[in-house]
Amino acid sequence: MTATPTPRVTIKDVAARAGVSKSAVSLAFNHKPGLSEATRDRIFLAARELGWSPSLTARTLAGSRVDVVGLAVCRPARVLGLEPWYMDFVSGVESVLAEHSSSLLLRLVRNMDEEVGVQESWWRGRQIGGSILVDFRADDPRVGLVERLGLPVVAVGHPSLTGGLTSVWTDDATAVTEAVRYLAALGHRRIARVGGAAALGHTAIRTAAFDEAAGALAGAWQVATDFSGDAGARATRSLLTASAPDRPTAIVYDNDIMAVAGLSVAAEMGLRVPDDVSLLAWDDSQLCRLTHPTLSAMSHDVHGFGAEVARTLFSVITGGEGGSHPVPTPVLTPRGSTAPPR
Amino acid sequence: MTATPTPRVTIKDVAARAGVSKSAVSLAFNHKPGLSEATRDRIFLAARELGWSPSLTARTLAGSRVDVVGLAVCRPARVLGLEPWYMDFVSGVESVLAEHSSSLLLRLVRNMDEEVGVQESWWRGRQIGGSILVDFRADDPRVGLVERLGLPVVAVGHPSLTGGLTSVWTDDATAVTEAVRYLAALGHRRIARVGGAAALGHTAIRTAAFDEAAGALAGAWQVATDFSGDAGARATRSLLTASAPDRPTAIVYDNDIMAVAGLSVAAEMGLRVPDDVSLLAWDDSQLCRLTHPTLSAMSHDVHGFGAEVARTLFSVITGGEGGSHPVPTPVLTPRGSTAPPR
């Protein structure tokens, strides 16, 4: 946690400066009704000026659950179970929650409306001290919800998608550009991308970056999938069955399970990796080092990303600084699955 | 949910038959203090005789959280993030929770003492309606805890480990025996098993079953690991570096990520699978179909297992039958990684 209250400033000082009672300060920081907008603003201003923030203990005593953090995920259960990114991310979040003796309240939702309802009911029912929001879309309704509720959150997503919310994000556009440049530098002129779910904001960012980076090549293809291995296999089979001039010599994938599936499809079709086709994975979970050949990948520390999200959320819950926190951009880890085209 | 209250029997009838007030019945079913043991027994007997059980709604109104289910996991965060079994299991649990608009409260713990404290605090703090208990050990302290608290649980583990708790379990001993018999039927006489964490009850069951099944072979080896791909790779390397008569011609693994790692080690050592060594995975997540060659595996539906556990827990929470629920025993799915020894 980055925000520790200055020892000598207390809730009493904040109340005095704002000209309200201590319980009014408590109401404001626990996002409860009963105060006018003007009073709340005055209290937050006074707290900011004095450098005061409520401690975890104070919030707990005030009745707010700060030892539980919410995470609603809008993906089919089956697909979620197959996605190494989520498991790595959740384990990173849990590693920090465990240090704080805190738990994760995890819920699968069918759509955005359901998530909005779940977040509101968790917060109003005092089941959580804050939430982690993932899978942002264009015009995401959670931005307005959070402002309306005063729910402490960390948004996992690019600031262009997450409004003014505190966010932790990866520069996907730069990483996609680097991936394409690397394959082009190897000599590839026909490059495909097997992307994730088209409705997700970060998929759209990657798609636009690929269009831009691959625009000058002789051939560029993009396929949208649902992130599953089966969908990655289908997309790879479809790309590789075209006859030579219409066939990519390199494929970049939006996660690693799809790249593993692509490797298997190449073998099934009698194509050698990397001699006949180069494959480049994304995320770089342990899978990429367990295949043969090993998979080149755009690598980042997904576990560490989850941990950073949880740390940022604890900071927000205790009244620390919000803002926009980029984590290191994925970097290329070359392994056995990429080479110059034959 | 299997238990629906008989429409005409109400809490009033139960109270009358037990000779207590309605609120005493409510206290008993919500596991709250204030009743003598004898009174509680009388109330439960009356309810059983009348076929009455509290509905979800009634329990919610009584202040117990039935829309949250607890799961504490005692594994290092990093290892958890790498274990497809857990993700498949949790996604299966979530698929049923979602149907009930319920959430999973997930917590990583460092040891059994911490889990015991977490379960007690969740239940006494009314944060959960029940819990899923996993990774049972010999003399597991959670059996006594549950009896003391009256916490509704489902234990994931063999009845020999889970005391009288309601349990959902897989017959691991039979499955290990089948795996060894299959490899022996192919002609293998030197078989190794790369097992999971030795402290876990289900690992001990598998170890004993392997000893029994492989006892008459020319060579049998077992290695304990932490279930991670890296540990599986190390174990495989160690087994395969022995010279021919001391080297297994077939290896069975306790999960599939270790088998994928084993496949990669065989390739790195210039050994062909299955010509030089047969590999048999366990659990059979999608990984086994994505490698080349594809991995033969002991298959079971881990997602469906998680769903069954959640359904059973809802039944327990609503006062339905407990008992011991075996799910189908893993069956052999032969693929490309097993063959007669050369």
Image (spheres, coloured by chain):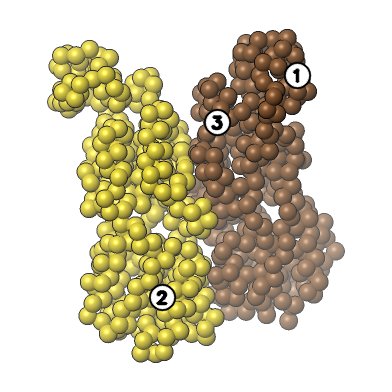
Chain colours: A brown, B yellow
Task: Locate residue B283, reporting x and y percent.
Answer: 39, 61
Please give the residue where the numbered disc 2 appears in the rendered image.
Answer: B279
Please give the residue where the numbered disc 1 appears in the rendered image.
Answer: A46
Q: Which of marks 3 and 2 is in front?
A: 3
Please give the residue where the numbered disc 3 appears in the rendered image.
Answer: A66
Q: Mark 1 lies on which chain?
A: A
Q: In the picture, which quadrant includes the C terminus of chain B?
A: bottom left
Q: How far apart are marks 2 and 1 (CA)?
A: 67 Å
Q: Which residue is drawn at 54% across and 43% down?
A: A99
Q: Which chain carries label 3?
A: A
A340 shown above or below A214: below
Find numbered disc 1 in the image and state the secondary structure of the residue it sits on: helix
B49 shown above or below A14: below
Task: Locate residue B198, reporting x and y percent.
Answer: 35, 62
Task: Locate residue A323, reporting x and y percent.
Answer: 75, 37
Find numbered disc 3 in the image and state the secondary structure of the residue it sits on: loop
Q: Nearer the viewer, mark 2 or mark 1?
A: 1
> Left or right of A223: which side holds B334?
left
The residue under label 3 is which amino acid type?
Val
Q: Mark 2 lies on which chain?
A: B
Task: Locate residue A60, reporting x and y percent.
Answer: 54, 26
- Pick whichever, B197 or A83, lies toward us: B197
